[in-house]
Amino acid sequence: MARYTGPVCRLCRREGEKLFLKGDRCFTDRCSFERRGYAPGQHGQKRTKLSEFGVQMREKQKVKRVYGLLERPLRNLFEKSDKERGVTSEIFFRNLELRLDNVVYRMGFARSRNEAKQIVRHNHIIVNGKRCNIPSARMSVGDEVALAVVSQKQARFTLAADLFSKRAALPWFQVDHTKLTGKVTAEPTRSDIHMNVKERLIVELYNK
């Protein structure tokens, strides 16, 4: 599966805000955005005026980078959300949040979504008693997520749990880091997702 393998701190600088893509480093003085909070490249410090399309594109790119998706999977997820009954933007973010890799990250089993994808692909995750190695698998209310027994002694899961305490708690799941298990208890809403993004612009962009 194709994925972005370049420097992730560069992405935060391009979007002009911290996207917390690199786990614990984002909370320290080593964060590149703290030292160089302007866009990367030779002309990064120049002011540019964006067109209407450019503003919409930046909002979409922000979401794409936060969730670690490439363009085709993101568009496919939007088209699927657009066919469901309800407010498209709310359904879109709900489907993004309920991806298995995001749930693993939200529950504090990984320090970043990229690490969560790797953990899922390497068969460290048990969903409802069965191994699941598909990061895009959609979770539902009542689904239980746990670390495989043979994986629980790895130090990175302890580090991820420590970082979890620095993030805002979310009401749509429960997690027990002593047992390394979690459960989806409700569907996430847009108000549960603390992200500085104007989803209306993304809907307008994809509906052109």
Image (cartoon, rainbow, N blue to C red):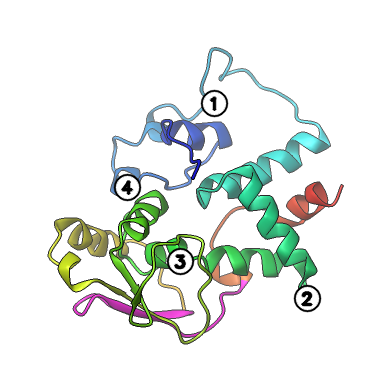
Query: Mark 3, residues whose alpha carbon is within 10 Å: few (<14), some, or many (≥20)?
Result: many
Select label 1 or label 3 by which is in front.
Answer: 3
Label 2 secondary element: loop
N-terminal of the two: label 3 or label 2? Answer: 2
Q: Are marks 4 and 1 in contact (CB under 8 Å)?
A: no
N-terminal of the two: label 2 or label 1? Answer: 1
The furthest residue to the right? 208
Q: Mark 2 = which residue? A: 86
Residue 72, image x, y percentages: 65, 46
Q: Mark 3 = which residue? A: 100
Q: Mark 1 = which residue? A: 39
Q: What residue type is disc 1 on?
A: Ala
Q: Is residue 180 magenta?
A: yes
Q: Is residue 195 magenta?
A: no
Query: Mark 4, residues whose alpha carbon is within 10 Å: few (<14), some, or many (≥20)?
Result: few
Asked which quadrant contains residue 7, the reply is top left
Q: What residue type is disc 2 on?
A: Gly
Asked if 63 appears above or below 78 in the picture, the reply is above
Q: What residue type is disc 3 on?
A: Leu
Residue 125, image x, y percentages: 32, 68
N-terminal of the two: label 1 or label 3? Answer: 1
Q: Which residues fall within the magenta stretch?
A: 172-189
Residue 101, image x, y percentages: 43, 61
Q: Mark 4 = which residue? A: 27
